[in-house]
Amino acid sequence: MRGAGYVWKRVAFAIATVYVALTLNFILFRVLPGSPVSQISRVPNASPEMKKILTQQFGLDRPLWEQYLLYLREALHGNFGISYTNRQPVLDNLVQAFANTIPMVAAGTILAIMLGLTVGVVSAVRRGSATDHLSTNIAVLFYAFPTQFMGMMLLIGFAGVLPSAGMSDPFALDATAWEALLDRLKHMILPVTALMLTLYAENALIVRSAILETLGEDHILTARAKGVPRHRIIRHYALRNAMLPIVTMVAMSLGAIVTGSILIEVIFSWPGIGRALYTAVLKRDYPMLQGGFLFITIVVITFNLIADLLYYKLDPRITT
Amino acid sequence: MTRKPILAFEDLNVWFGVRPDNPGFHVVKGVNIALKPGERFGLVGESGSGKTTTIMAAMGLLPSSAEVSGRVLLEGRDILRDGEKSVAPHRWKDIAMVFQGAMSAFNPVKTVGWQIAEALDVHNVARGVAAERRVGELLELVGITAAQSARFPHEFSGGMRQRAMIAMALACEPKVLLADEPTTALDVMVQDQVLKLLVRLSQELNLALILVTHDLAIVAQNCHRAAVMLGGEIVEQGSVSDLYHRPQHDYTRKLFEATPDVFAVARKPETAKATSAAPPLLQVGHLKVSYPRPRSLREVLRREKPQAPLVVNDISLTVDRGEMVALVGQSGSGKTTAMQAVLGMVKSQGGTITLNGRDVTGLGMREWRPLRRQIQMIYQDPYESLDLRYRVRDTVAEPLRIHRIAATALEREALVVEALERVGLTPAARYLGRFPHELSGGQRQRVAIAASIVLKPELLLADEPVSMLDVSVRAGVLHLLDELRRDARMGILMITHDLSTAANYADRIAVMHQGRIVEQGPAHQVIHAPEADYTKALLASIPDPDPDPDRRAAGDAVSSRRQPSTALPDHVSESLRHKQW
């Protein structure tokens, strides 16, 4: 198979990056001044003995490399410690929050990509027309809006009509599964719209310029001379070649979305990963933060890996 | 010939950018061409002469800003009458096209077979298994095995790609084939193959062919008739033999004179040798260069050095003062690498480089710097080698500033003016304040040369100095190099893929192939008595501008056309005479 080495190289590279992130996460909290023991033992009558016992309990008396190995072992088993605020394992908290975030972010992103692709292709194909000017200017306008502004505007406009906070109606206790689903979807409308509107603009502008660039290439002229119909040229030549830069940029922005959803989740009180991190910062919940950062790092690395593999699938020229 | 024309242009005019308030550019002016079935017709002209626009009009592929008048008749029917509607049915089915950019004319993400099959599909010629079989046949026709249809364009070499392009053009059995500079980007031996293929196919399939090119020799060898275009007009049209032997228009004559003719090279008077006591200006001995490649895992583990193939393998040559040596080879032969090694830009793996008797092999960048005054480069592409935001004055003065020559700005300006006048940009004051985009291609290359000679170097390294320039401009630049060699006694090492250019201007030629110099000697000797098989093959693939070379073989060594014409500037004709006798 063509360049199976490429796939393995990418996967190995991603795993190595995760490992480095794990290690940095360990080092970061060791080099920070102060120790957890001195924080906890700052109680009246704390004796040196008590400090010593605490140190032993936490395993902080062991050599650094042993601590590191322990940390790695526990991390690999999914143990990131206990949250300070709700006394639950960090992993459970993160998984719960992430599961809430994914449907909302995925819906918003997919809609944004679809809308961005459509708008971008239409403006590129009708370059210079009134449609192009209108849609490009609107995209630039939305691109310039900060997320929180967009969220606020949607809240002001639709708060009475659509649910504006949370992801389900807390009073619908005896709802059937069908009703619960409808309720969830209704709650998703506003945050998803906000996310879509902030993201689509960038996609539309990227798609437009990528397609304009490929439309100027020689093989488009060959296709026209060959008598290939216009819509086919756009699909198999322009869009297919423009997909290469588009995939890279969209995938790179996907990683940032998870963190970018902080604003949306806070505005619409969505109990997702973004809001979990936001509260963790406010309450100085270090284990949560540590786990959360690691989680986000892994998500970003995964998306980059997906982009690399997609790129490999789309571009036959890649072999190494 | 009484057969009716298959394709005819009647009073074709094309304007670009016409608006109510703007007359636009009149790029094709009243072109008349009539093409008979099976005829091969050459359309010759320099960049901007409107030759590509002319054939694009026949395909209905001009941009929407173009306005067309006149008729293009395909078997007597005007295919431009109803615009897109009347052209579309004929595209590829009756008129097909081969494009210049063999590199980029295929969609890079689809297989070659897919793209040929697509042509069959959209014209309802064949689908499925039948299409697959037809694609195989077409590829075999151009000498590519059917199994290779599953490959992607980037897996083909330039020549293969162009042949696949021809196969694709023949997919729907067209009656007319338009070839736009089909071999411009190819090496001369590959060019020869592609042209022979086109001629063979046109004979076998009774295909009318329009060959658009800037190279007269290609037309002379492959076409029956030709037209010469200048500024959108056809200035002369006729059989290739008439154009060559009895040119009516000055421009035609000028073009033929500017086309270097490798076979007309005569023995040159020996250039006066430098006094034997002085060491040669540049001496390269047993030079070896390879590009490092990353070590594989096994090599890292075993601590082995990576085995990289030698790009330059044991070459030796000398360049003396007042001498022009040409290093000739195809792309990938290692000639540019050799030059970069001489400049100290890439590390050599072995051998010595001596400049003026001083060993410069392996010197560091800091030690090189004072030496750079003696050795200067001229690059291939004057559109890229000049900084677009620098005025001519700044470009030429920059080396002076770097080497801290000339104490005052006034003195510096004087040196800049001197260099500009030396390269023929007179009066220099007219050019000093210009930006590169305000200059023509030839003028740009002259500015680049001025920037190289302003330091009064002893050795000039010229990397394909004319290959990006139009034919009629080339001669001027080459004459300039020749003058620098004779008058300023500079040593010039010129890299070129074009044996004809080398033969006409260089004192000695070194032919390079796969990293080795396969033959080296005085120009006339290499041309007329080649020893290496590679040189012979190279010579055999060069098209001769004389359509009937047999006549010359019969004793007519220098045809009448070769007489220096009074239309040329004095110094040009003088050096032409210098070349001939």
Image (cartoon, coloured by chain):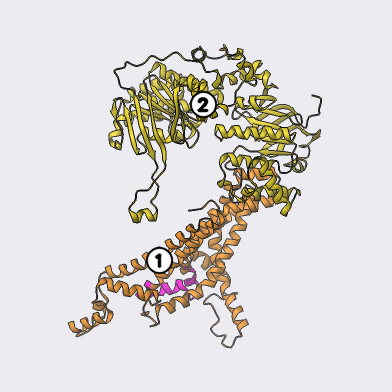
Disc 1 residue crowd, few under 14, some 14–19, many 20+, Cα 10 Å: many
The kind of secondary structure element at disc 2 is helix
Q: Quadrant of the N terminus of chain B?
A: top right
Mark 2 against mark 1, which lies toward the viewer? Answer: 2
Letter of the orange chain? A
The image position of residue B2, as x and y in percent, is 81, 25
Identified at 52% across, 20% down, the residue is: B528
Identified at 53% across, 61% down, the residue is: A199
- Residue on which the image places disc 2: B499
Q: Nearer the viewer, residue B121 or B292?
A: B292
Q: Is residue A277 magenta?
A: yes
Q: Marks 2 and 1, Cα distance to the nearest angstrom?
A: 57 Å
- Residue on which the image places disc 1: A18
Contact? badges 2 and 1 (CB < 8 Å): no
Q: Chain of mark 2?
A: B
Disc 2 residue crowd, few under 14, some 14–19, many 20+, Cα 10 Å: many
Q: Nearer the viewer, residue A242 or B375?
A: B375
Q: As displayed, is residue B322 above or below residue B470?
A: above
Region in magenta: A263-290
Identified at 64% across, 52% down, the residue is: A236
Q: As displayed, is residue B24 above or below residue B271?
A: below
Q: Chain of mark 1?
A: A
Q: Is residue B224 magenta?
A: no
Quadrant of the rendered structure where residue B494 is? top left
* Chain B: drawing colour: yellow
